[in-house]
Amino acid sequence: MSSKENFKIESNKDKEKVHIEQIENLDFLVTQDRMILILTYLGEKPVSKIEIYFTERHPYLDLAEIIDQKERLEQLLRTLGLEFKIVEKRIVDENGFEEITFEFLISRDKKKIEELEKAINEKDERKMGELYGYPKTAVDAYVKSMRILRESRKDEGDILLESIFDRKKWFDSLSEEERSKLIEEGVLSFSTFTFSKKHWREELEVVRRWQSIIRKKAPKLYQEIIESKAWYLMTEEEKMKWSKEVAEEELNLIREKILKKAQELGIEIEEEIKEIVIMLNAFDFRIANFYKGSVDKEPICGPWILIGPPKTSPGEINEELKNRLQKQQEWLKRRMINILNRFYEERSVQEDVKIVLVDTDIGFKIQNNGSDSLKFLVSEERLKKLKDYQQEFVDFANFLKEKYPDYLLYHTDP
């Protein structure tokens, strides 16, 4: 081999290494998306699909930030020399919130992208599985099981070893030796498809190959994946610990965004209500205004939070938008009533201390039941009541924080 040819090979290896490191550093993509992108780049998977998602329901999400992520991924795909197509999907959900999905179809072969788009449009699950590089036996079992479930023939719904969704049931059915080996390997964390009941051992070899490639080519990502234990392998104690860690990490991100935005606007969020402002944002309540309460300056009242629609310019207002905003507010109001009911299910406080919902012209407030009566009390009583009222908001924030992991991971309100 000539020195020129040798240099070219080494140069290609260096370029591949740099490209894979760039994929590893796409911090806005989850580990599984980064893994399938690397496997597609290396030609191990014929085609892959990655989604970047925005919903108006999350008040702390910034559409500009999502657009930036989309553009960053576009630029990287061009750098990688991959073919791709972006399918933009916009819908308005039943509660009036707009959802935007940027669906990236990615391959080394443009024809494969066309085939995948056709399969998606025709809901051809068999073709999609084939294009994603899944074993034929797993794809066949998945397609058959989905057909049975749709036909509600649950008595035959065990074609897939985990009845499509219950992987733990399958894992627990293995021998102790098999379970120990799989845990030690960490191979199950690299699986992106559902195994079939009869052929899972052969199908597992595909996942082992993917694991081996990631170990060799993307060591940083490999370490991330291997350290993240598959959900169905966790004990209940481990699940609880992991859920709290994920929730705390997300809350820290929300806290940073809110405090940064407040600083940019020159707004101070007082300590007495800071946590409830953060937690209500985390639970997707859009906050229009807030007040910590006061007994020595006007207005004399307890703390309150105003939940309102996003700010819009006069030119944006039309009948369709009005209807959407009304639906959003009705949904938020129903949720707040339900959450407050849960908060007070096993909680006993004086009636004036209770947090209640009050309608306003642009949304609704939550405030203490006796808030508007503070001005009629003598000064000593006012101060004591204000502290009681503020503490109730602190306790409400703590209640929401306790329930947040379930909301974040399972979309379950308190």
Image (cartoon, grey):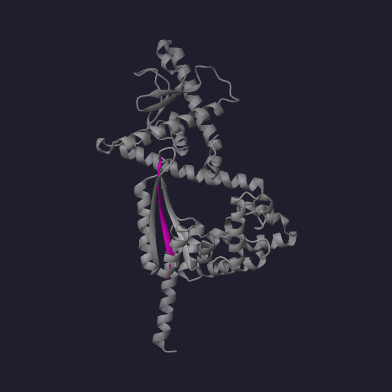
Q: Name, please, the residue furthest toward the left.
A: 315
- On the rendered image, what quadrant is the C terminus found in? top right
Tell which of 205 and 322 is nearer to you: 322
Specify whether residue 78 is painted magenta. no
Q: Is residue 411 visible?
A: yes
Residue 93 x %, y %: 43, 42
Question: Residue 313: x, y in percent?
Answer: 27, 37
Residue at position x 46%, y 63% from top?
A: 116
Residue at left offset 31%, top offset 35%: 319
What residue do we see at 59% from left, 25% from top?
Answer: 345
Which residue corresponds to the image point at 54% horizontal and 45% vertical from the top-left?
409
- Stretch of the chain drawn in magenta: 97-108
Residue 314 picture location, percent across and down: 25, 35
- Answer above or below: position of 326 versus 405: above
Quadrant of the snapshot with the N terminus: bottom left
Q: As displayed, is residue 119 above or below residue 236?
A: below
Q: How many marks?
A: 0
Relative depth, front residue between 40 and 158: 158
- Residue 75 falls in image quadrant: bottom left
